[in-house]
Image: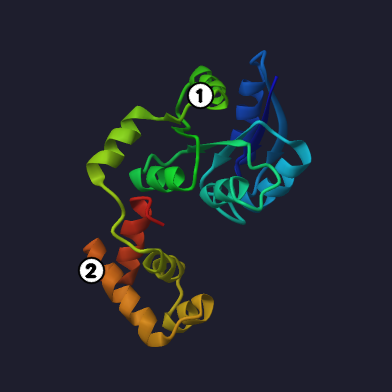
Amino acid sequence: MIRLLLAEDQAMVREALAALLGLEADIEVVAQVGRGDEVLEAAAAHRPDVALLDIEMPGCSGLDAGAELRGRHSEVPEVKVVILTTFGRPGYLRRAMESGADGFLVKDSPAAELAAAVRRVLGGERVIDPALAAAALAEGASPLTGRERDVLDVAGRGGGNADIAAALHLSHGTVRNYLSTAIRKTGARNRAEAARIAREKGWL
């Protein structure tokens, strides 16, 4: 029996996924959480074989939660991670693969395809939505550095230079430089537009 942890912030979607996957004879949903920062604790308590994680959740993203699950200090480093998202953004796929995810699927995949993907990753395969993989290859890697992403993320949530500097422990001049570079790299006119473009492409 495949033990599955399901993380999805929308209760109706989470319960529907759990019900559909629970119909599979060889899959048991052993834990459900609605926040990214609940994933690690639930995985340690229930010891799933596969963690199926939404990307956009309160607490922390599914990408970050998946990286923590597979990280050096995780209690369950052997768990397989499958990212499931509404947003088929190539940048998200690249970040998921860089963090060690074993699969990446969009939510409109049929339930049978999702169940098959769970079995395949448990068997050692890496499963990626083919259309999204093609789009990621066509678009190329994110031009933003890690610090530029951090600065844009805070700016995109309405933070001014002082907020960004305080949150990231940077000087005001360094914040201005990072913002200027990020705006140029995204082809935006200002920080708000740069953050929007980066988020739409899955770079944040």
Total marks placed: 2
Q: Nearer the viewer, residue 29 or 169?
A: 169
Which of the 4 quarters of the picture holds residue 122? top right
Q: Secondary structure at mark 2?
A: helix
Residue marked by disc 2 = 184
The residue indicated by pointer 1 is 117
Residue at 46% x, 67% y: name it.
Answer: 157
Residue at image x 53%, y 76%? Answer: 167
Q: Give the x, y percent position of residue 108.
A: 45, 29
Q: Residue at x 66, y 49 (%)?
A: 74
Q: Quadrant of the N terminus?
A: top right
User: Marks 2 and 1, Cα distance to the nearest angstrom?
Assistant: 39 Å
- What colouring method underlies this structural image? rainbow
Residue at the spot 39% in from the left edge and 67% down from the top edge: 152
Name the kind of residue labelled 1 in the image: Ala
Query: Element under label 1?
Result: helix
* Left or right of 7, for residue 169: left
Disc 2 + disc 1, Cβ < 8 Å: no
Q: Nearer the viewer, residue 41 or 59?
A: 41
Q: Kindly report which numbered mark, 2 or 1, lies closer to the viewer in this rendering.
A: 1
